[in-house]
Image (tube, rainbow, N blue to C red):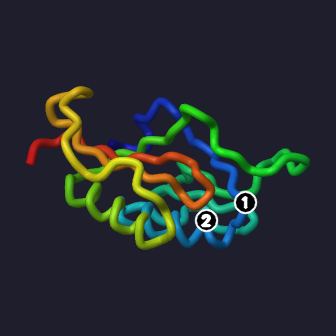
Amino acid sequence: MAEASRVIDHVSLGVSDEARAWAFYDAVMGALGFGRAYDKPPHVGYGRKHPVLWIGKPHDASRPASPGHGVHVCLRAESREQVDRFHAAGLTGGGRDAGPPGLRPEYAANYYAAFLFDPDGNKIEAVCYLPT
């Protein structure tokens, strides 16, 4: 999916330990073909040309970072292999499994996805709609 055709411009996730989070997101975003499109700590944004996912401390520094209940971010993968690599990279990088790679026919016939919790408990997903 071309970045210019997306509905949402970007998403920001607050984290408690930036270095740990950036290591995790370097791995999972790299598995999906994304890198650091903006890299000026304390602000890091991942994308291809433009940041689509920002990772850092919450702007409201008076409260700690906490994941939203029922909120998750889904990232588009270009292949099922990318979904598999995303999940493996996340587990290796300190994340927790929230649903292994596989078909989810309850969502759509070719909905192949994997779910992770990042080290702060934010839920992220990678999905590919292409058949095998």
Give the residue drawn at x 55%, y 62%: 37
- Please provide percent x and percent y for residue 121: 58, 51
Q: Is residue 4 or residue 122 the one in the foreground?
A: 122
**Which residue occupies the extreme right position in the image?**
62
Q: Amino acid at mark 2?
A: Ala
Give the residue drawn at x 64%, y 46%: 12
- Horizontal side, residue 14 vs residue 90: left or right: right
Q: Answer few, some or many: residues within 10 Å of disc 2's Cα (few below 14, many 20 plus, some between 14 and 19).
A: many
Mark 2 near mark 1, Cβ–Cβ under 8 Å? yes
- Identify the mark at residue 120; answer none if there is no mark: none
The residue that disc 1 covers is 16
The residue that disc 2 covers is 21
Q: Answer few, some or many: residues within 10 Å of disc 1's Cα (few below 14, many 20 plus, some between 14 and 19).
A: some
**Residue 41 occupies quadrant:** bottom right
**Which element type, helix, strand or loop, lies under badge 2?**
helix
Cα distance, mark 2 to mark 1? 8 Å
Could you tell me which quadrant the N terminus lies in? top left
**Which element type, helix, strand or loop, lies under badge 1?**
loop
- Please provide percent x and percent y for residue 59: 81, 48
- Please provide percent x and percent y for residue 68: 63, 37
- Please provide percent x and percent y for residue 103: 19, 41
